[in-house]
Image (tube, grey):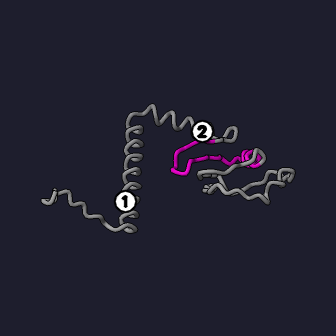
Amino acid sequence: MGLSCILKMVDFPQMKNLSNTYSPPKRIDIDSIVVYGQSGNISIDAIRWLIKHRVQITIMDWDGKLLTTMLPPESTNIKTKFAQYHAYEDTDTRLKLARKFIEAKFAKSEANLTYLNQRYPEIDYDLRLNSSY
């Protein structure tokens, strides 16, 4: 199983002359790369190299909005697709999976709120009307 990598878009002017560099395909331990940022660029050569190495590329905006995803050809195993289809056909399995997705979403939301609560002070919202108004 490979790893995922998250990159922030950064422009490196010294790397612009590397387009003629050839690197033959080899096994790398990265399955996907998530690129996020407000500005930046990725060269066609870099995309070609990553796709050749069967690395999925996902590009997101600075706020996490998905802009695009580039998949290598035949990126998903056919057995996986059949298993997903058969899971969809079975109502009990479909409901169990949906429940697990929702539980995971709640757990991640709770973790995010806990993280934010630890880093930001609590704010006392006193919504009572002030008598001086």
Q: Amino acid at mark 2?
A: Lys
Q: Amino acid at mark 1?
A: Leu
For the C terminus, the image quarter is bottom left
Give whichever of 52, 94 is nearer the camera.
52
Can the viewer see residue 53? no
Left or right of 5 on screen, residue 115: left
Find disc 2 in the rendering and name its residue: 79
Can the viewer see residue 28? yes
Image quarter for residue 96? top left
Counting labels gives 2
55 in magenta: yes
Residue drawn at (49%, 34%), measured in percent from left and top?
86
Closer to us: mark 1 or mark 2?
1
| Residue 71 % position (x, y) | 65, 41
| Residue 7 % position (x, y) | 63, 57
**Bounds of the magenta segment:** 46-69
Q: Which mark is residue 113?
A: 1
Image quarter for residue 5? bottom right
| Residue 89 % position (x, y) | 45, 31
